[in-house]
Image: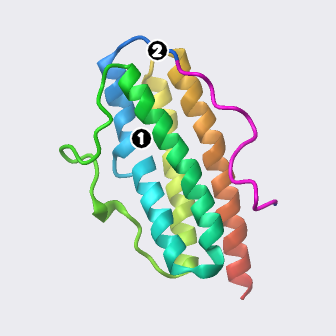
Amino acid sequence: MDLSQVKCDLPYPEVNVAKDLSEARLILPNYAGRDSETTAILTYAYQSYMTADLKKILEEISIVEMTHHEMLGEAIVKLGGYPIIGSGCFWNGSFINYASNPKVYLKNNIDGEKLAIKNYEKTILALNQRDLKLLLERIILDEEVHIKIFEELLLKYDET
């Protein structure tokens, strides 16, 4: 696998939606919940500081997660909502995976990406607006790339 490719080649869809606070609320957990883009960004940033040989790939994956975060935040605003981080119990620093052993955190990252996909799939089923569904389906494609990358990196660590 080409580890320089950290996202799917397909473009992200344009999101044109009608205001709908219930749809905005459905997206908020993906944006800034326990298993969210916010958590992924900060987890991968933390891990990039801990392991010099994985720094670049983790930073690049984190940037892709930032793109997802931005698109979800913008969609929430278009829906008439507020992309709040830390409101109520939406997000806090305890959600970050603070493991420092690459074998441990790569396994956790794989599980986290799989859980993110499952959460996106559940959200898609609950959404009504086509553009939102297309956005989440496209984000899932990136998360699948991340799983493959983490699995390949884990294999390299298992060989040592």
Q: Can residue 36 be seen?
A: no
Q: What percent of the width, then of the height, locates residue 74?
A: 43, 30
Q: What percent of the width, then of the height, locates residue 108?
A: 51, 66
Residue labelled with disc 1: 30
Scheme of colours in the image: rainbow
Q: Quadrant of residue 55?
A: bottom right
Please name which of the two marks, 2 or 1, marks the residue nearer to the observer.
2
Callout 2 environment at 10 Å: few (<14), some (14 to 19), or many (20+)?
A: some
Query: Residue flagged by tag 2: what amino acid is it?
Result: Val
Are the two marked residues, 2 and 1, in contact with CB atoms closer than 8 angstroms?
no
Q: Which residues are magenta?
A: 2-15
Placement of 159 over or under 105, stated as above or below: below
Placement of 81 over or under 138, stated as above or below: above
Q: What percent of the width, then of the height, locates residue 15?
A: 53, 21
Callout 1 environment at 10 Å: few (<14), some (14 to 19), or many (20+)?
A: many
Q: Secondary structure at mark 1?
A: helix
